[in-house]
Image (cartoon, helix red, strand yellow):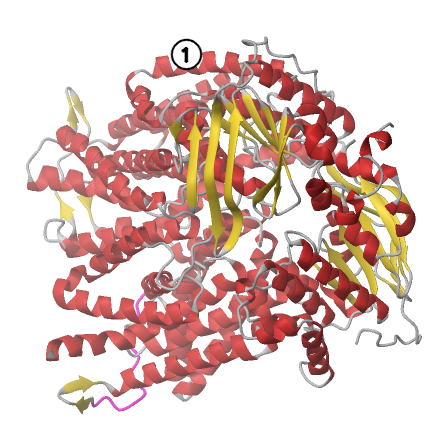
Amino acid sequence: MQVFLQTFIGGMSLGAIYALVALGFSLVYRTMGLVNFAHGSVVMIGAYLASTFYLTVRLPFALAMVVAIGVTGLIGVIIERVLRPLENKDFDLMLIGTIGFGIVLEALAIVIWGATGRAVPSPVPAAPLDVFGLRIRTYDLVVLAIAAAATILLVFFLQRTKRGVAMQAVAMDHQAATAVGIHVGRSNSMAFMIGAGLATLAGGLVGPLLYVSPAMGGLLGIKGFAGAILGGFGSVPGAILGGLSIGVIDSFAAGHFQGYSELVTFLIFTMIIMIRPTGIFGERTVNRA
Amino acid sequence: MTATPDQSGIGRRLVVDGLSVRYGGVTAAHDVSFTVQPGQSVGIIGANGAGKTSTLKALMGLVPRTVRSIRFGDADLTRVPGRAMVRHGIGYVPEGRHVFPGLPVEKNLLLGAYTRRWKGPTLDTLGEVYELFPVLREMRGRLAGALSGGQQQMLAIGRALMSAPQLMLLDEPSMGLSPKLVSEIVAVLKQLNERGLSILLVEQNAQLTFEVTTECLVMENGVVAMTDTSAALRQNPQVRKIYLGL
Amino acid sequence: MRFRLGVLAVLAVFAWLLPYQLNSYTMHVVNVMLLYAILAVGLGLAMGVAGQINLAQVAFFGVGAYATAVLTVRAGLGFWVAALLAVLATAAVGLVVGTPALRVQSHYLGIVTLGLALAFTNWVTNSELAGGAEGISGIPRPGLPGIDLSSAYLYYYVELLLFAVTLAFGLFVVHTSLGRRMRAMRDDSLAAGAVGVEVPALRMTAFLLASVYGGVAGVLYSGLIGYVAPETFSIANMFLLLAMVIIGGRQSLVGCVVGAIALALVREVLIDYPTYAQVAYGSVVVLTVVFAPTGLAGLPQRLRSAAGRLGWRRTVRQAASLSPFQPYEAGPARVEDAAPILEIRDLSMHFKGVKAVNDVSIAVPAGQIRGIVGPNGSGKTTLFNVISGLYRPTAGRVILDGRDVTAARPHALAHAGIARTFQNLRLFAALTVRDNVLVALDPTRARGTWRYLVLPLGVWRRDRALRREADALLDRFGLRAFADSQPTALPYGTQRRVEIARAMAARPRLVLLDEPAAGLNGDEVRQLCDIVRSIRDTGVTVVVIEHNMGMVMSLCDHVTVFAHGAIIADGPPEEVAVSPEVIEAYLGETMAMPAPVASEAQR
């Protein structure tokens, strides 16, 4: 039981990161029906930017994050602007376009920061807490708290602000949204910006947990995406639950299958997609002739 | 609620001149021209595929169009994009309702007032819409997608009213509704018109249209086949022929 | 044609003489390039031709290479035996990776295949069998009797031969039945199902093809390098491959090859600056999808049309015109009170509580033209969608000629004799008019795909026979002049007629027409009526949804009126037209009152 709980808790902090990545995916999917394959690369860029501002520029960790989020938000806006001609027309082409952006971002990261990775020290004291015999790293708690705060802020934005509600409306019916006066392009641009911001939040937070390297984007991206699908694509609670589940599955897989953990995670994910393509919270959509 | 006077103090006149819509190789509407006087209610009727919906969508700027000119009062709307039409005092109720299904009723209504601030006068408008459609007040927290067809239609009309328009474009509000619900919608439209709201109504249901409007265009194969007062058209055998193909 | 043969001959001679001009390093580069070309052709078949997003192509490549390595080094098999087994193993993996395509498409499929590719890299990096991060070295060089393949020069010819064979096979597939059905599925999987294409089987076939190409390239790779390691099969290389296919033009196999060679060359030139090369090709991918989605392969076409617009080329082509329809030979005389060919019993279709069709029963006797009318949103199209298998009804049965076909797959229903058209036209946009018809005409089933391996000549002959049949059908429908045009370039009325021709190509027993007159002018409507009558006279039953009441009145033997998902009237047209319920549904209640209709009906 002790081991079980320890493994479970170990999976939660990475799970929270996956959940943040999943939220970014979901938000963009929800507003534009597009899966942003560059999302993982934005996570990676965010991780590098945050660690650079933190380690090299020596900004406080929180401030480093904020600056990094600002920069990647701009990247999100650029991606959306370039691909806008394809919006609501050809989703497969848009998907490939985002893959293209992913390739570029990854190469740029190597150009700027080199191919070897870097380790980021934890911004909070490393001594773990001891709760009922379970060891909990303080940084894990920080990650969970920030992820929770970000989720609450996002939900507040989507439910309580005019722009947030409008963003959801665009996703549901872009023509009706246009008719009530919403600028669809601008709304999509903002969705991409927020998505990129969430990616950077995840990237910045994951720095002290993993090694920051140009290759980290692919793995974080696909696991975040798996989380988003698992929970039901486009649903906020689904993304959170799905991301956390992937983290926990990962943690158990690592305990039981060591090096093969990724293999096991992806196989489980593929099976779930096969059985229930709409995820836990998703709804089946109707094919219209 | 809707008769908020314009700068000029009276309502505004809509003048559409030479409106055409083409999709690929198909001409959906060709050279359609008409006028809606301030406070007037005008209908466009015709069989399915006659180009009514295309005309309305093109007027709203939701589909690519060619047009000589569109004027609303003093404003030239010829080059105004779809998202800005509502700022000029034009509300739109789309065919098939097109409410935002995943949002609650009240959010749907508030989105209708997207171009206004969500406080003060807007909340008054919201109260008036709830008064007009009490059922929407009951359902305010319910997701719009979970409403019945009739309730969704009321919501779509309510949403358009939330922008405090001077002219409302309605596209087939009777679609898929039972006769009883249709007569309720008719009553609401008449009431709104009496309060000074100009109406442009596109309908397949000619009877409904004649009841609500004073003047009608009859469309056939993308062109205006005739224009007359609703009272005269009601007696016109040609209308019956166009509809029933006899 | 002669020009093409000439180009081909020049290319062949060039490829043959190439090794004499190159040093051994460059020879090696060319050898690797050919492998990428084979991989790109496989990816092009899955993504460009069949429309299945496949981000696992590099994993197929890896499976082929690793399987060869394991079987030769670990199991001690000879190279060619190992090679054969490796390709089979890759094909098996391809089928496994393809299974998600049966359930999900587009983005989901992309991420699932990408995940499986990552799973593969994860496995080889950790597995002792696969040698972990170091990989497996010491793969024996393949030998042929009398030829020493350890020379990169001679190996080149083996690769060249295999490349030529695989490319030719790919092109053969694309231009015959299998490829045509795949392209149809890519353009519109719903319509493809409705004309009898077995969509699930073809999706699997697409992955099977892609994996075999990957396997062949993998085998050649292990024989060329003699060493396999995980990083060759990384996601970065997957994206490079994807870039080759997109930049080259995914819908054209030759384009894929050009893209592969071009990018491999660029990569070689920028070998000292690999990251800048990556920035460059990533950007080109983005620019390609936004500005030239057809890639390099589509450039000639775009240049030509641009030249046409600028008036540099005079367009000599006369605008082709629609010829009159030639009626079918009348079939056996119609039997009054024939047994129903289509029976719908107590059918309901609800969507999230909306009762689109509610407890409807209809029986259509064989050889009838049945009209279905009713206001918008009254459930007519939903009914069609249930009959043709797109929806599984909430309750009730659909019986075709005495056989219960409720909720059968669309392609099974098409094979059983149901054909349909769609309200908003669903032609295969990137196929020619002839190919549109051919897809429906083609009785080839997915299980007959083995013929491609065993009897390619038979496939070819059969295809030519089908072409002749298609041309005869196009002649009948007066569409021959448009046989080689893309349907989207045609006038709307002509497109409508193409769709009817496509529906008739499968020789159905029951045809469902969904608003066939929408958007047609008076003359076209009259021609349509003639066509429908002639179809009926061959003994085919026609059910038509229509709003053009004039057409319904003159054409239909029997009319069923829908309102709110239920039938409100049913009978001969002249009775239905005067029934108060119908007039009310269309015009509103008081219009039903005044003066008898008959006296007003004179024009």
Who's the residue at 80% across and 73% down the image?
B2
Vertical side of C145 occupied by C574: above or below: below
Residue C144 magenta: no
Secondary structure at numbered mark 1: helix
Q: Mark 1 points at which residue?
A: C461
The vertical placement of C42 against A92, above or below, is above
- Horizontal and vertical percent for residue B29? 79, 43
Q: Is C118 situated above or below C151?
A: below
Q: What residue type is labelled 1?
A: Arg
Q: Residue C222: percent from the left, percent from the top? A: 21, 39
Residue A176 vs C598, above or below: the answer is below
Q: In this rendered view, identify the residue nearer to me: A178 or A225.
A: A178
Asked whether, in this view, residue B122 is left or right of residue B69, the answer is: left
Position in image of residue A178 (x %, y %): 67, 62
**Residue at image x 65%, y 54%?**
B178
**Residue B97 sits in quarter:** bottom right
Q: In front here: C572 or A45? A: C572
Quadrant of residue C73 within the rendered picture: top left
- What span is colored magenta in the figure? A115-127
Residue C249, visible in the rendered structure: no
Q: Which chain carries label 1?
A: C
Q: Magenta span has A125? A: yes
Q: Which quadrant of the figure contains the C terminus of chain C?
A: top right
